[in-house]
Image (cartoon, rainbow, N blue to C red):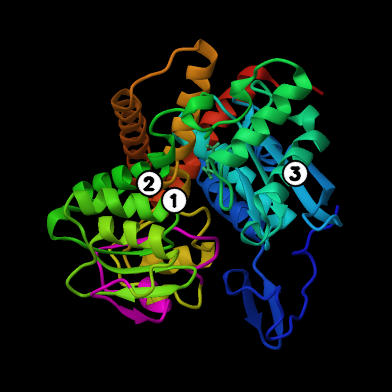
Amino acid sequence: MTNSTKKPVSVKKNSKRRHSRSIVSRKNLTIPISVFGNVMKQFDAAAKKLKMDSSIMDFIKMPRRSTIVNLPVRMDDGSFKMFKAYRVQHSIARGPAKGGLRYHPDVTLDEVQALASWMTWKCAVVNIPFGGGKGGVVCDPNKLSEGELERLTRRYVADMIELFGPDDDIPAPDVGTGPKVMAWFMDTYAMRENRSVPGVVTGKPISLGGSLGRVEATGRGVMLCTREAAKHLKIDLSQATAAVQGFGNVGSIGAKLLHDLGVTFTHVSDVHGAIHNPKGINIDDLIKYLHAKKSIIGFPGTKTVRPDAVLFAKVDILIPAALENVITEKNADKVRARIVAEGANGPTTPEADKILAKNNIFVIPDILCNAGGVTVSYFEWVQNRIGYFWPEDEVNRRLEEKMVAAFQDVLEVSKKNRATMRIAGFMVAIMRVVDVVEQRGIYS
Ligand code: GLU
């Protein structure tokens, strides 16, 4: 298997592969930041504090199985195009592998391994009986027709069908995918099995066995964690200001629910750019505007600003809700928020983490902050298994219970060990995985 992060490559200035979220320059070389390398550093820092048996640590930190396939897909013009695709099962120690399926042009094996690993720790932090997995297809879903996307999804399932199943590996939406892709996924799997298997994916449309509250769940979890952090830091949310980077499912819903609690959003950005209004942006109206115009730019009452202005805004709460490696050692010193609530997976590098900690910024780590999505995925899977569906307020009540308990568990370990919330989150998760591995034993 090749790993794009292994050897330093120099990248042309305007090359398509050059992506600011994953590149650092050292002298004349540009070296991609290995996202999986970042998870390793986070893991190692927590493992060091735990002082546990190093052979178990070696066992639980590496991805269990990584699969790479090349998918031929018939395009609308009759031609065939090849798409590289991955599924990584990082761990099945605590239950079936669980995690999203990402469609994005910059997907790499390194990234999918990192995302799969974060899923293991995320599921353990919120204490749900899953391991970690992740899938990815190198494609730009915005440039594919609905028919092409459907054929791509069905071929993805068919080529790796033996990996999936409600007791094996359960995908869900991630960047670039949503309920529609999950419906095709479930249908392909069910056709191949010749029976109905709703529990093979989560994040399905409601009429196909999806859970009420699943679409909003990740954003709701971000709101709940931010609310708990504000309580802990004695910040009054009705007086608080915020900035959100990324206005997709997680960023927009997280911002909407915090806005409902009285938080004033002064900065919002999406893939098209960033907007600012020092008096506050009405998030409900912005969501309607986005649906109509497909971009946040030009929203009445706001002016367009540089995307950087969002990360460096002087606000109480900063929500990075886009992709990895946006807060790095190069810019972390410019972050002026009091709370960083990680809606995205991996937005902060380990080097940046140290700078944020030194500047006394309270980071709610991704494996806690955005765990609301997979928590309601768990509820969806449970409802699929019992064949009985809960009302939305019950889903939300159970989600709140899980998120608040997880936040308190991590906060307690953080205080006891004088560790950041990230390291404490990893400590909680590692302890839970190690407990299971010790009880099961290692089959060798
Ligand atoms: N893709 C989401 C995440 O990164 C959800 C995963 C799931 O529900 O399985 O947490």
Is ligand 1 less than 8 Å from the beta carbon at label 3? no
Q: Amino acid at mark 1?
A: Asn
Residue in view at x 58 percent, y 74 percent: 20
Q: Which residue is mark 1?
A: 249
User: Marks 2 and 1, how far apart in space?
Assistant: 7 Å
Considering the numbered disc 2 on the image, is that residue within a helix, a strand or a loop?
helix
> Could you tell whether 64 is left or right of 221 in the image?
right
Quadrant containing the C terminus in the rendered view:
top right
User: Marks 3 and 2, how far apart in space?
Assistant: 30 Å
Q: Position of residue 309 (x, y in %)?
A: 36, 78
Q: Residue 226 or 430: which is nearer the viewer?
A: 226
Residue in view at x 30 percent, y 47 percent: 223
Residue 257 sits inside the magenta stretch? no
Q: Amino acid at mark 3?
A: Arg
Q: Are marks 2 and 1 in contact (CB under 8 Å)?
A: yes
Q: Which residue is mark 2?
A: 219
Q: Position of residue 64 (x, y in %)?
A: 74, 37
Residue in view at x 51 percent, y 39 percent: 122
Q: Which residue is mark 3?
A: 151
* Earlier residue among tags 2 and 1: 2
Magenta extent: 299-328
* Earlier residue among tags 3 and 2: 3
Vertical order, 317 against 135 (above or below): below
> Could you tell whether 410 is left or right of 66 in the image?
left
Considering the numbered disc 3 on the image, is that residue within a helix, a strand or a loop?
helix
